[in-house]
Structure formats: C-alpha cells, structure tokens
C-alpha cells in the first residue's frame, strides 16, 4: 500500500527552501525521521524499519529489513522463503530482504507529522537566522522601539525579535516610554532553546563610541582616533581624540560646524554633556587637557605611582574639581592617572604653614 504527501505539500517544501533557506533534502530527512518514530509508536517498535519519501511525487513507503526463514514465526523480523521469493526469486534462507510494510492508514499520520516537522524546522531556522544576524552586531548599535516593561526590565522591539535592557544597563536619569525610538549598544547575544537572547545597554561606553563613529566621518574613516572614553551615563562624559593628519583638528571634527555633530549625540543620550579633549602622548599635557574646561598652571607627575599633582588658579579650583568631584573624577578615568588638585593659594599655604588641604582624585 502506497501513501502520499500531496503534490501541493511537496511544492510548499520547495517554496520553503527558496524563502527560508532550508534545504529540501534537510526537510525530507527530518520528516522521514519523524515518520519512523510515529510508525514505531503506532504500528510496532521494530528497530529495522526505515521510511522513504519520493522527492518528486511525495510517495511515502515504509520498509522493514527481514530475515528469510523456512517458517515465519516473528512477522516483524522474519519472512518465509516462499513469500520472500515472490519479492526476489534470488533470495535464500538466512538472507536479509527489504519488505514494504506501509500501513493502510499511514497517510493521515504522515501528513500530520510532516506538517509538525516543517513548522518546527522553519521556527528553528528563523531563530538561527536571527541569531546569526545579531551575533554579528555584538559591540554595535541597534535601533528599536520600547514595547513594554516587566518589573524593571525594558523590552526593545528590534523588528524580527526583542532585546532586553536590564536595570543595570539603564541610565538612572532616563525614562523609557512605550513607543519611544531608542538606540542601544549590543552587549551580548546568547543562543537559547526559545531563540536568541539579545542583551543591550544604554550605559556602556561603547554606545558613545559608536555614536561618534556614526556622526563624525573622520573617526569612522580613521583620520581621527578615539583614544579614551570616560562616562558617567546620563550626566557627563569625556572623550580623548587624536588626529593622524596634522591638517585635521580632532576636537573641531568631533564638535562639528556650530557644534552640530556633538549636539546630535547629546540629544541621542538625552542631554548627557560631552567634553571633547585633545589627547597628547605627554601625560602632563594630556592631564591638563583632561581637566578642561578648567585652566591648569602646572602638572607634576610621579611615574612610579602613576599620580599627578595639578595646580590651578584659585578661581578655577571649583571648576577643575567639578560638582561633587565629577570633572576631576572623569579626568582621572580618562587618563588613567591619580590626580591631586590644588589651588595656588593652597600650595603657597603649604610652603609657609605645611597645610595638607588638598583634593585627591583617582581613576577608581
């Protein structure tokens, strides 16, 4: 008895091959394996059966490998010599022969099983495609729409899948409202049984780095090099840049005409202030630049301790330190040096009275 997957189903498999990129042979082999399991479950658990599906017609046939015996005692595994020679006149006792054992009502089970297998394989393939797409975006920016919030976790719709913005990756000063369009940094993509798990961030320094590459062609092209980033998400950042071309001003390139380039990034980061600093191979110059907008009188460094003592005018002290020490703290993170800031009068007072009044800032 021969059973068929109809011609429309075979045509559908060919369409799936074209649209989803799942090979026809892969699908047929998966269906054959599933049908074998269904056959053993419904019609006996003989281990020597196999399924064949005709790739053109969809015809399904079940075969069992049986031993030729004089008198058949175990029909699942044996066939009499008389019946065997009706199939192949050349067989002898003890030979193995393929016998078709397709059940009469196997077509219904076959159709149902085949559809389940195809749906499952399509789902797996789509998950695989999405995973491959986003695993290649680790360390890059994706744009999505805020869809919902469960507890403190924000779910971002990326079109074909969702990304998770965990509480630790959210900026404390930001509110995420359903429908908001948001750029996020892809921290990690994991493979799971339910599809790819995409973890994104709004606090990662990489977000600022990628935004700069998008807005500043000179950085993207490699003319201007981004040497360091120090970020306090949602509040303020400092970036250190260097030009490989002496005719290109790295700070001016980042700021852009009338400040348009840096302002576009500030807007994307919802008001986070960004100080653009000129990097210098001389740590004294670099540290002085990093404390911008404050003016620095002198920088004395201790290479062994990787510490710097900075002197600023009295009226610049509060600016150099910044609100709650933020400017000095970011400068320390940016340069990687411990920074002690003193005003001129404090230094003069030390020299005359041994005063120990000072502000110490480290990159930690």
Image: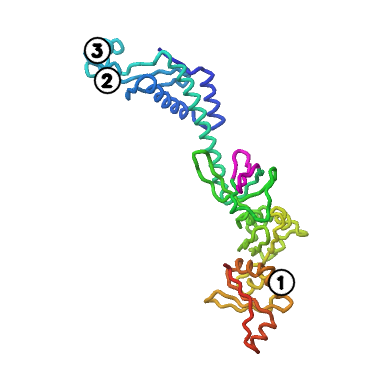
Q: Distance from label 3 to label 1 (Cα)?
A: 102 Å
* Element assignment for label 3: helix
Q: Which of the numbered marks, if any, corresponds to residue 96?
A: 2
Left or right position of 357 against 126? right
Q: Is residue 67 above or below residue 244?
A: above
Task: Give the mark nearest the N terminus, 2 or 3.
Answer: 3
Residue at 62% across / 53% down in the picture?
170
Residue at 67% across / 70% down in the picture?
291
In this view, the residue in front, 282 or 288, is 288
Residue topped by disc 3: 81
Residue 272 visible to an observer of this rendering = yes
The location of residue 276, given as percent across then percent down, is 68, 64
The location of residue 275, given as percent across then percent down, is 69, 64
Magenta segment boundaries in residue numbering: 147-163
* Element assignment for label 1: helix
The location of residue 307, given as percent across then percent down, is 57, 75
Q: Is residue 91 above or below residue 267?
A: above
Task: Give the mark nearest the N terminus, 1 or 2.
Answer: 2
Task: Give the mark nearest the N terminus, 3 or 1.
Answer: 3
In this view, the residue in front, 224 or 360, is 360
Q: Is residue 10 above or below residue 237?
A: above
Q: Distance from label 1 to label 2 (Cα)?
A: 93 Å
Q: Distance from label 2 to label 3 (Cα)?
A: 11 Å
**Quadrant of residue 181 within the rendered picture:** top right
Q: Which of the numbered marks, if any, corresponds to residue 319?
A: 1
Magenta stretch encompasses residue 148 = yes
Residue 220 visible to an observer of this rendering = no
């Amino acid at each position: 008895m021969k059973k068929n997957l109809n011609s429309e189903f075979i045509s559908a498999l060919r369409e799936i091959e074209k649209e989803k990129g799942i090979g026809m042979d892969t699908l047929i082999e998966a269906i054959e394996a599933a049908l074998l399991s269904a056959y053993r479950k419904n019609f006996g658990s003989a281990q020597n059966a196999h399924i064949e599906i005709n790739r053109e017609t969809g015809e399904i046939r079940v075969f069992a490998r049986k031993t030729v015996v004089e008198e058949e005692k175990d029909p699942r595994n044996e066939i009499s010599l008389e019946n065997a020679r009706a199939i192949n006149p050349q067989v002898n006792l003890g030979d193995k022969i393929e016998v078709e054992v397709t059940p009469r009502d196997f077509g219904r089970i076959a159709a149902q099983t085949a559809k389940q297998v195809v749906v499952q394989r399509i789902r797996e393939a789509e998950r695989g495609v999405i995973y491959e797409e986003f695993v290649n975006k680790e360390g890059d920016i994706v744009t999505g729409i805020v869809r919902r919030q469960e507890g403190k976790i924000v779910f971002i719709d990326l079109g074909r899948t969702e990304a998770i913005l965990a509480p630790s990756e959210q900026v404390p000063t930001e509110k995420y409202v359903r429908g908001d369009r948001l750029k996020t940094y892809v921290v990690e993509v994991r493979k799971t049984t339910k599809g790819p798990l995409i973890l994104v961030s709004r606090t990662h320094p990489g977000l600022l780095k990628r935004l700069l590459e998008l807005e500043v062609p000179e950085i993207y092209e490699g003319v201007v090099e981004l040497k360091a980033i120090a970020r306090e998400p949602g509040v303020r950042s400092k970036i250190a840049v260097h030009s490989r071309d002496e005719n290109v001003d790295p700070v001016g390139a980042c700021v852009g005409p009338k400040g348009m380039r840096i302002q576009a990034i500030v807007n994307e980061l919802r008001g986070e202030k960004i100080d653009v600093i000129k990097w210098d191979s001389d740590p004294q110059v670099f540290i002085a630049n990093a404390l911008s907008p404050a003016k620095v009188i002198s920088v004395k460094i201790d290479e062994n301790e990787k510490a710097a003592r900075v002197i600023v005018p009295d009226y610049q002290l509060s600016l150099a330190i910044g609100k709650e020490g933020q400017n000095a703290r970011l400068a320390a993170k940016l340069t990687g040096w411990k920074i002690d800031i003193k005003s001129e009068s404090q230094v003069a007072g030390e020299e005359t009275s041994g005063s120990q009044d000072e502000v110490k800032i480290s990159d930690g």
